[in-house]
Image (tube, rainbow, N blue to C red):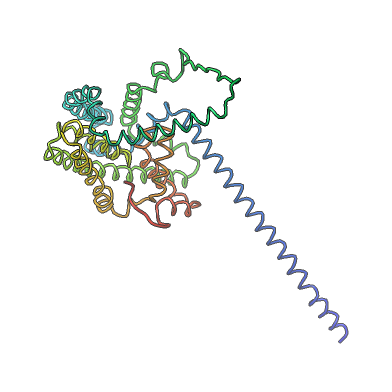
Amino acid sequence: MSHIHQFHTILTGSRPERRREKSDELVAVEQLSKNVRWASFGIWLCAGFLTLYALYIGRNLFMPILVAGFAYLTLRPVVRAMGRIGIPSGFAATAIMLAIATVFGTIGYVLSGPAQDMLQQVPGSMPEVKEKLGFVFDHLETVNQATEDISDTADEENITSDEKPVPVEIKQPAWTTSSPLIAGTGNAVSFVSIAAALLFFLMAAGDSLIVTVVSSLPSFSSKRRFIEVLEGVQDALSSYLAWVTCINACLGVCIGTAMWLLGMPSPLLWGVAAMFLNFIPIVGAMVGIAMVFFVALVSFEHASFAFVVAGTYATLTTLEGQFITPTLLGKSMKLSSVLVFISIVIWGWMWGMLGVFLAVPILIAVVMVMEKLEATSSMNAMLNGTVGKAVHPE
């Protein structure tokens, strides 16, 4: 019995030690896993900031490339449809580029006259605008004068009789790299030329470039995932831009008709301008409202009518952005409104107005890529708006 009791004591005494050792190992593994996650998060965060910095520095190079890439993904279904009926990709690319040039050339030719006349009237209209908005400018001038008086009083108290301010003169250097002639892709002609040429070559190459990229990938799973990501981004962008173009065209018709009924000059110009400005989220509507307000202020006798015109424009764009577009696009195009706004702010800060225009397509592309990455399910849920309230970006 003593041997049995000894054996039992040994057995019962060793179990807590094994449990403690196992618990210590689990704690060490959990701590290591947590450290790895934080290190991975830091690496991805640094990589993201470095990428944004590179995109900011090379914006004159990356902007036309990104525009051409998005345009290619949007028009790729058209090129493939023309290829299925026997039209070579080179002829299809030429036909599409000619159609685009014809449409924009016709619109520019029709609207160039009214737009030029309106721009010529702007300098001479400023005194009239200031006179009609005199009650606003008077209040602003009073506030500015009070601010200047406070600032002068504070400066007089801080500067003694022996101290004299040192004049500072800032001279702009005669040669800077920000000059449009030197920056190259910084001017509109270079941007349009690069984007159009790259778009043509991408469409003319057909799927040969994609086949080359796929063949260079190491495994079958990576090839399949690349094709899935490409098809997802292509379908999302094509659907989004097609629906938005139709909706904006209808909005342009409604605003043009409203401007005609209100007696605004060149209602066709305002309809087309509203259509193109509405491609730029938030900022486009604000620019359109400011433009019609200024022209109405000059064109009509009473300043109150300018508020009516601007209010009509704002009402139509608000109805489109908050009710019509989300209803037509449905759940497939819902994005987190917070992230849409952040995307607009970031890309607008880095790339200006074109960045604001590209903010939503870039976010859609990121969401489509995240959907195919199994390790980013939580990030994808945040991006596509399944966490919290989700609304369409308008």
Determine whether 236 is above or below 378 in the image: above
Q: Identify the residue at image location x=18%, y=24%.
A: 109
Determine whether 326 is above or below 141 in the image: below
Place of residue 6 in the rendered image (x, y in percent of width and height, measured from the top left) = 86, 80
Q: Residue furthest bottom?
A: 1
Say whether residue 208 is visible.
no
Q: Is residue 21 left or right of residue 290?
A: right
Q: Nearer the viewer, residue 295 or 17?
A: 295
Place of residue 236 in the rendered image (x, y in percent of width and height, measured from the top left) = 33, 46
Determine whether 63 is above or below 44 in the image: above
Q: Is residue 230 left or right of residue 325?
A: right
Place of residue 115 in the rendered image (x, y in percent of width and height, measured from the top left) = 20, 26
Say whether residue 109 is visible.
yes
Q: Nearer the viewer, residue 350 or 137?
A: 137
**The N terminus appears in which quarter of the rendering?**
bottom right
Q: Identify the residue at image location x=35%, y=25%.
A: 191
Q: Residue furthest right?
A: 2
Q: Is residue 33 left or right of residue 363?
A: right
Quarter of the figure with residue 60: top left
Quarter of the figure with residue 69: top left
Quarter of the figure with residue 202: top left
Q: Nearer the viewer, residue 235 or 393?
A: 393
Count of picture labels = 0
Place of residue 223 in the rendered image (x, y in percent of width and height, measured from the top left) = 44, 43
